[in-house]
Amino acid sequence: MGVPNQELHTLVDFVSDGYLVTSFYLDVNADEFPAPEHIRQSANSALHTAGKGFKERQKHLSHEAAESLRHDLHKIGQFVNAEFQRDGANGLAIFSCSARELWQVFRLPTKVQTRVVFESQPYVAPLATFFSHAKPTGILLTDRQHARILTMDDGKVTEWADSEDFVPQRSDQGGWSQMRYQRRSDEWAKHHLDHAARLVLQLEQHQAFDWLVLGTEVDVEHDLAEDLHPYVKDRVIGRIHVRIDAPEAEVVEAARKVRDLAEKRLIDRLMRQIQDYEGASGRGALGLDDTLRAVSEQKVHILVVQEGYRQAGAVCPQCRLLLGEWRDVCPACNIPAERVDNVVDSAIQRAFELGSVVEVATEYQQLEPIQWIGAILYY
Ligand SMILES: [Zn+2]
């Protein structure tokens, strides 16, 4: 947790200067859209519907603002039809504001609901699942001779180092010479592990990661964990058993399973903290009303929400108070409030703007004990 995502900040801090931003989400999961033409059909149908919505809004827009939106839709259509390839992604998100030269594409391992939104800000709430489940993660694989380091960051996988230390192979022959040889081999192996541990620390300085997955032979696991710098050691979330020369996809799949489990444990821990804090120190918010109040008061450190939880509500256009039910007027400002279809998305969007961490539970009914939403507060 806590590595700020540059791309997310660019979106959240984006100033549209009176133009509208097109936020385009496309479900591209292979079960429902097995072939490229299914993806294109779905995209073109969503863009066609958006085009009709655009015509409705056009009369309220300046010529430049209308041209910007028209260009957004055209560019997105071109991208999906000519450039996009699924390559294992389940979702696609594009943010475009042509007049202000905004163009960002996210390939998402997580699923999204297809939709096109025109607003003065990028509509980033649906990215919350992606960001909370794609924490930058390092993977260190070692055997007695090799080390491989990979990182998974926002769905991108990079292999960083391919280093090799010479270690004499263990001999099958018995006797004195074998013992001596083996001892020497263990020293080499130890030296190699030191080297691997140093590589991980170097990587951390080069490219920050929240979590680390170790893949080692069973008998050297302990040694390696001992060798890691405490700063890096704290980030180890689990271990995988794959061959050192396993294909990248196999390594990543095994590491993703470890990461999903770590995410589930993290959310369980946050939920327990929220329950504890809520009773005692007041540093927790539990349930929709408490949580919306905490977000409105800018007190949220970590927002925790069940994926798919939604509730109609209202937002005050002046003080931006979030309300979990429809009200005609803001109780604070006494001016008309704006109705929103899903105030949970408004809360996520606001939390991102305020720099809060957002964690999304994807396990079935995981957050039922805290009524689907809660927060850890700063004070
Ligand atoms: Zn207000």
Image: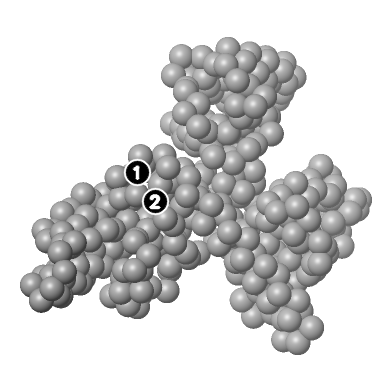
Quadrant of the drawing holding the C terminus: bottom right
Name the residue that disc number 2 marks: 242
Q: Of the residues shown, which amino acid type is indicated by label 2?
A: Val
Q: Which residue: 90% across, 51% down?
A: 326
Q: Is residue 147 left or right of residue 181?
A: right
Does the CB distance between marks 1 and 2 fall below 8 Å? Answer: yes
Residue 93 locus on image (x, y percent): 56, 34
Number of marks in picture? 2
Residue drawn at the location 68% of the way across and 51% of the way down: 362
Does residue 52 appear anywhere in the picture?
yes
Note whether residue 59 is visible: no
Q: Viewed as shown, does residue 174 lie left or right of 308? A: left
Q: Compared to 112, does 200 lie above or below?
A: below
Task: Return the residue nearer the eye: 5 or 147.
Answer: 147
Neighbours of disc 2 within 10 Å: few (<14), some (14-19), many (20+): some
Quarter of the rendering containing residue 266? bottom right
The CB of the residue at mark 2 lies under 8 Å from ligand 1:
no
Question: Foreground: 88 or 75?
Answer: 88
- 64 or 161: nearer the viewer: 161
Q: Secondary structure at mark 2?
A: loop
Mark 1, secondary structure of its residue:
loop
x and y percentages locating residue 104 in the rendered image: 47, 35
Left or right of 322 in this view: 95: left
- Most distant residue in the left direction: 177
Name the residue that disc number 1 marks: 246
Amino acid identity at mark 1 = Ala
